[in-house]
Image: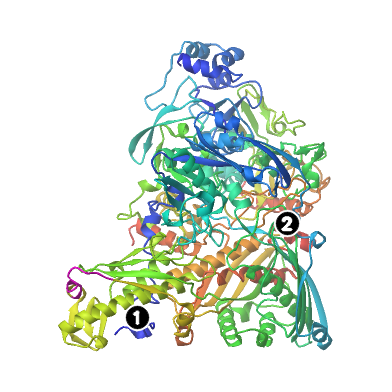
Amino acid sequence: MATAAWPEKKDRSLIGKSITRQDGPVKATGRAKYSFDMNPKGLLWAKPATSPHAHAKLVSIDTAKAEALPGVKGVWKDTDLIGEEVRYIGQIIACVAAESEEIATEAAAIVEAKYEVLEHQVIDNDIKFATGRASEQEVGKVADGFKEADVIIEGDYGVPVITHCCMEPHGQVTEVRGGELYSWPSTQNVSRWADRLDDAVGIERAKMHVDCQYMGGGFGSKFSFDKWGIIGTLLSKQTGRPVKLLLDRDLELSIAGNRPSGYTHIKLGLKNDGTITGFEGSVWGTGGGGGYRLRAFPYVFEPKNRKTTMKGIRTNRGGQRAWRAPSHPQTCLLTFSALEDAAAKLGIDAAAFYKKNLNLTARPDVYAEELDIAMKMIGYAKKAHLRTKLDAGPVKRGLGIAMHTWGGLGHASECRVTINPDGSVKAEIGTQDLGTGARTVVSIIAAETLGLPLEAIDTKIGKNAYPASGGSGGSTTTGGISVSTRMAATDALNELLGIAATKLGVAADKLEAKGGRIREIGNAAKSMSWTDACKMLRTGSISKTGANNRTEAQKAGLIDAGVGGVQIADVSVDVETGVVTLIEMVAVQDCGLIIDMKTCESQVYGGVIMGITSALFEEALYDAATGRMLNADMEFYRIAGIKDVGKLKVHMMTGEKYEKRGIIGVGEPPVIAPAAAISNAVANAIGVRVPYLPLTPDHVLDALA
Amino acid sequence: MKSFEYATPRTVDEAVEQLADKWGETEVLAGGTDLVTCLKQGLTAPTRVVSLKAVKGLKGISSAKGALTIGAMTTMGELADHADVQKHFPALATAAKNIASPQLLSTGTVGGDLCQRPRCWYYRNGYGLLAQKDGKSLVTGGDNRYHAIFGNSGKAKFVSASSLGPALIALGATIKTSAREIAADKFFQTPKTENERETVLKPNEIITAIIVPVNGAKNATYEIRHRQGLDWPYVTASVAKTNGGTKIVLGHVAPTPVVVTGNDPAAGAKPLSGNAYKVKMVKTAVKRALAAASNGAKN
Amino acid sequence: MTADENTNMQGKGLSRRGFLKGVGAGGAVATIATGCSTIDRDGAVSLTPRGPEETSITLNLNGRRRKLKVEPRVTLLDALRNRLDLTGAKKVCDRGTCGACTVLVDGEPAYSCSMLAVEAVGRKITTIEGLGTPEKMNAVQKAFVENDAQQCGFCTPGFVVACTAVLTKNPDATLEEAQAGCGGNLCRCGTYVGMNQALMDAAKELKGGA
């Protein structure tokens, strides 16, 4: 009898190996059809008309001119918004559908609207704009912490608003046909994308068919149908034709989600030997017009006596959304900048300082082990220097360290595995592959469980017609889909083993599936091929649905939560130009049992690179006078190119100690620490802190001036 | 983007005939790398676009009479890779190569580089070339980190986007057009109204070639840039040293390239609220360009 | 030029005929005014301006001649994606910055978002679809797959085309030279580490050393 427990290392044929993602070839050859690529027959293009004012009362919308343009087939107006306030530039007020993209664009531009312009506010880095009461939290008594201290060290730091900048913009192709909705959204939440869309468009939930085979990045911003999902559906209903509505880049960057900013003033109490005794930090920032709260502050190191206050600034900007590891990159930068500044002021080596205070972290042993590995990888002993000992000449080198933590418990998920009489196997699951390798993970688990080669599994994902699986957020997918697939495959296999048992004359619980055969455990002589076993099914397939019950699965050691990571950056800074160059970065990461080493490492490299990008380049720049995001393009909203990221090395923690915990997600954690590590390295190199990200030449020169 | 008609003249005369004498009624399409973007952004809405792709005689680099003649439709990649350019004018080759995008190098043209519109984000976001609102400059009170530190006392605060301009001026080049020859240092102008552009070209005048004298000048270009791939430099310095003296020209610091006259290249800089850092960059770029020119081979 | 086209132009303030009169030039005007066009069979060169309405063009696309109708304002990218269903080239920045729309024009990489479809007439256009199939990938595609140089995959076709261009031209490229071939492309998922290895592996295979 097969059990759901993960196989011992010696018994794993696929799990933990470096396996090439299965959809690689269709992607690399341009054959993968993303939502943006869907061109059903009769397709209309939709383009939104948007508010040019950051804050105004919408008085009227007039689409007559747009409708008169030849080729325009449908118009939608946000009549509910008339008389109400628009709250940011780019807010959608109407939309036109036309025979071509060019006509739709031209028509959207001539939608006329009248506004009563109101005062706007987009500045987020000055606490004087904060509104409402501060939320305050005190653990222990911060006053006691400071009383114990030999020195008090204070500093100001900040992280600006950045955007997701998904390569494929938000949006979808929708077709309402025969009262049913067929939708191809770019989403990270296939099974639940359409939830609550029914009321808005007047189509029953059961009649909504969602299909997303490939999607061009989400990073936390693509869970729901959004306003454009409603508009696209209504325009399709209105015109009787399929409608493509994907955001142009400026809207993608300014209205489809962003990561809230975080600015802080931190006060640290320390003993002369580096022991942290107290922490007080106030944080402010904006996530647009809504509420504001950064979690996990202070970060990783939690002094017994600590106090934090938080205040939000409501701005007339597009609203925040979950951005890969929500809150953590910001609080990591804010905390670790203060920590390393404190170490520098005390004249203590940064690594020694962290080691001294590891008792303030949740997992001292893991961080200690990871820190040692990271130090070895970067050559810390040779390269490290105190901040007071700067290189001669204009180009100066420095090292910086940061650490992170994340949960990553697998989400709720169901999967159906079917074994057919011809020996074929299908795994169906309503998950999605954001590029994480989810599709391949399902195949690996099913193949491993059934003792088959990877190619034997026909894995079907990306439709809400399949058993429901959670949205891909919070590093929960690999754990979720692995367990549900494992459960389903194990159940299906056990039924097959029962059938094979009679033929082989061996009790079912003495049988196993290995190498394409059903055999007696430890006796290859008593066996039959997988296909022969399946032939005994005659006409009836075995179809089993398995689920990830999170609590039980965690108890059973199939999944777990809580990882740590240590990253060290080695940078050079040209103090005559302000240019920061990342020379090398190492990332040490644990994530429990690894399913596919290749795509797992890719996730970590990808996270590190995204973190590097936020450290060096990213900032959503808003203009106070006009209220506009000035760099809603990819020219001045810079992301790193291939030559900008230096030499990167990832080390995954493996071995019994980590693997026995089961699977833990790894999508978010590696993105958290890079900015803090790089900022610390820059401070180590030039002797002064560049207090605000990104570490652009202008910011560096201003800090040096 | 508004619709327009598309003309493909085969001679310079035909091209000029297809052009209106008012800016914006027609536009010249060379490589298209800037114009197509401007059309999409609605910065210009011509009724006709005149492509120079089929015009004979505008492409290629030839050497004669102590000068290199570069056809206006020569691509930036062809310029960067040309042996004579690399040998005589490293200042030009570097400026072109630093564009760093093979796609732009293969498409963007020398003439197009000189005529491309500024990247000022107020301009690109539809607030006009001079970015005025209620009689005030949006740039002065706004985010001007990439704006001018020289020549910014008038309404124009943007910086010239040309990559080749500073090097061509330093090298004493001449711009040949359908109507005349213009010294490179007289080619750029600072517009005073929305109806003017950043060069002295007339709306129905096209660049045909650039003539660069081979006079033994040691020359180099140094750019301060952040991203190693396609990006705009913060500051550029192009220098050319001859027995007659050293010519230093700055890019991306003013509405036109700036010729340095005194000993201190940053003298006279008037930073706006957010770009004082460029002063230091100017000094660094000039110092490093001069060093590169001294180390480089004589042309 | 048909009478209809003439009429269509009237309301625009700059009628084709009136405008050319305004310019007051010689020979070309006569040709145009009499309606003698010299459009070659692909629609490449014409003394008569084309459009603004849809005009017929033929593209040399992945070794095949493809006829289509486009307005002059239609970019090559939009012609490929929206009119020919060649969706391998992606629309991301749409401003000639990110490289997701990269195609080869006469063997050189170019941003198809920044080129008008009518400009592509007479040029040899190769898109990602022309470089390989999932069953028969080219060296770069194979190396991208093997080294996991892609995650969401949306930027991948553009990178593959750019890498193919640089390595075809110079299979002896050093890593730095090969990377320079990607200087006009951007990836958001962060696949550059796999890409570096892919560049070196593909170069090796192209040199016959694989």
Residue A690 seen in render: no
Q: Position of residue C72 (x, y in %)?
A: 49, 30
What label sits on residue B198 in the rendered view?
none
Above or below A276: residue C75: above
Q: Nearer the viewer, mark 2 or mark 1?
A: 1
Q: Position of residue A385 (x, y in %)?
A: 69, 77
* Rendering quarter of residue A638: bottom right
Specify the amino acid type for callout 1: Arg
Mark 1: which secondary structure?
A: loop
Distance (Cα) linking label 2 and label 1: 52 Å
Mark 2: which secondary structure?
A: helix
Residue A430 part of the magenta-drawn span: no
Q: Is residue A513 left or right of residue C151?
A: left
Specify the amino acid type for callout 2: Asp
**Of the pair C41 and A163, the residue shown nearer to us:** A163
- Specify the segment rendered in magenta: A533-542
Q: Position of residue A335 (x, y in %)?
A: 70, 74
Residue at the spot of label 2: A698
Residue drawn 43% across and 50% down?
Answer: A181
* Rendering quarter of residue A440: bottom left
Q: Residues within 10 Å of mark 1 (few under 14, many from 20)?
A: some
* Rendering quarter of residue A384: bottom right
Residue at the spot of label 1: A12
Q: Earlier in the sequence, mark 2 or mark 1?
A: 1
Residue drawn 45% across and 13% down?
Answer: C35
Mark 2 chain: A
Colour convention: rainbow
Mark 1 chain: A
Q: Position of residue A214 (x, y in %)?
A: 43, 56
Residue A534 part of the magenta-drawn span: yes
Q: Is residue A119 left or right of residue A513?
A: right
